[in-house]
Image: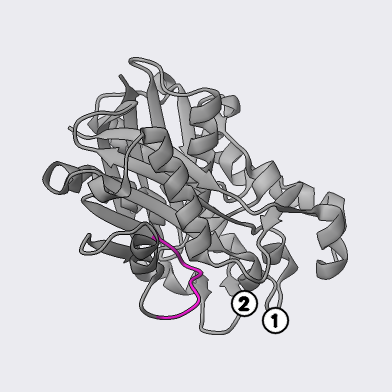
Amino acid sequence: MTFLNSFGAALPGRAVTNEELSPLVGRTPEWILNVSGIQERRWVDENTSVVDLAAGAAQDCLGKAKMEAKELGMILLSCSSGARQFPGPAVQLAHRLGLSGTPAVDIPLASAGALFGMSLAGDLAAARGPILVVAAEIMSRIAMRAPQDSAVSVLFGDGAGACLIHPDKGMAKIRGSLLGSDGAFAEDLKLEFGTGIDMNGRSVILQATRKIPRGIADLLGRLGVKAADVGTFLMHQANQNLIDRVADSLGVERSLFFSNIRRYGNTSSASMLIAASEWAAGHGFQAGGLTCFAAFGAGYNWGALLAEGV
């Protein structure tokens, strides 16, 4: 059995409101809010890298765990917006944390990478020791590239989140996880080199509204748990309308799905861990309480993870 020990986050200081973004995308602030549920998002300055964000989230997470980086058995870093093809930012993060020899693995899965990292870390921590899962994204530089799709570019922000998976102790034990992939839809959400995001919005929404609740239901069924038994759902913050649809599909109150997309936008793979860090600081796990994590992203890749407070 492995545990969720702590969470962390790092967010840029600049908040970009719908009013500021509106003239850049040719849409009204009201339109942006209605289609996305977003009022503002954070953007980095030109000197900030994904490694800078990742290091901030990692240090925040380790600080809350009262643990030093040298105690880590592995680092898993999810990033789909890195500055180059290789090497990925995982090794740079390890170096920034003062590590040499500790395995650092990149998980370049847009939106779903943090969930995949948590699931893999849950399986590996018993053998490797504590594993730090980090997701860091600078989506603003990609979203504003030409050719620009205003329905896509208004969604994205920048940030990083982190989670420490520990083999022996933590705030919640991992009850189980489920992962899935379907390459039949790989062309419907993609980022070619040097271009903007190419998204078939209809396909993304259709598949996400099917696969996320089905993945959650399949995992809960396997563990003998009903959706109504879950106290909090922490989902990838893609779009408020999508979050509401997933809640409706599962037959649970929308209020059970923690949401901070209104203030941070869609930060791709970082969003779920940023949300988890904020939720843990303000609410947190209760003994015996169930929390379900879920994500969906390009590929398509999706998954769910259930944790129980201790």
Residue farthest bottom in this picture: 194
Q: Nearer the viewer, residue 42 or 115?
A: 42
Q: Which mark is residue 119?
A: none
| Residue 257 shows in the view | yes
Q: Can you identify the residue that label 1 sits on? A: 147
Mark 1 crowdedness (10 Å alpha carbons): few <14, some 14-19, many ≥20? few
Along the horizontal axis of the image, is 45 left or right of 214? right
Mark 1 lies on a secondary structure that is loop
Question: Which contiguous range is marked in magenta?
Answer: 78-85
Q: Nearer the viewer, residue 4 or 288?
A: 4
Q: Nearer the viewer, residue 50 or 296?
A: 50
Q: Kindly indicate the quadrant of the structure image that contains residue 299.
A: bottom left
Q: Can you identify the residue that label 2 sits on? A: 196
Badge 1 amino acid: Pro
Badge 2 amino acid: Gly
Residue farthest left in this picture: 127
- Against 282, is 297 above or below? below
Query: Residue 89 at x, y = what percent?
Result: 40, 68
Q: Residue at x 42, y 41 (%)?
A: 61
| Residue 295 shows in the view | no
Q: Are marks 2 and 1 in contact (CB under 8 Å)?
A: yes
Q: Residue at x 35, y 50 (%)?
A: 133
Q: The N terminus lies in which quarter of the figure?
A: top left
Along the horizontal axis of the image, is 270 left or right of 88? right
Q: Earlier in the sequence, mark 2 or mark 1?
A: 1
Query: Residue 19 at x, y = what percent?
Result: 87, 55
Query: Residue 47 at x, y = what percent?
Result: 63, 70
Q: Residue at x 56, y 46 (%)?
A: 237
Query: Residue 183 at x, y = what percent?
Result: 36, 68
Q: How many marks?
A: 2
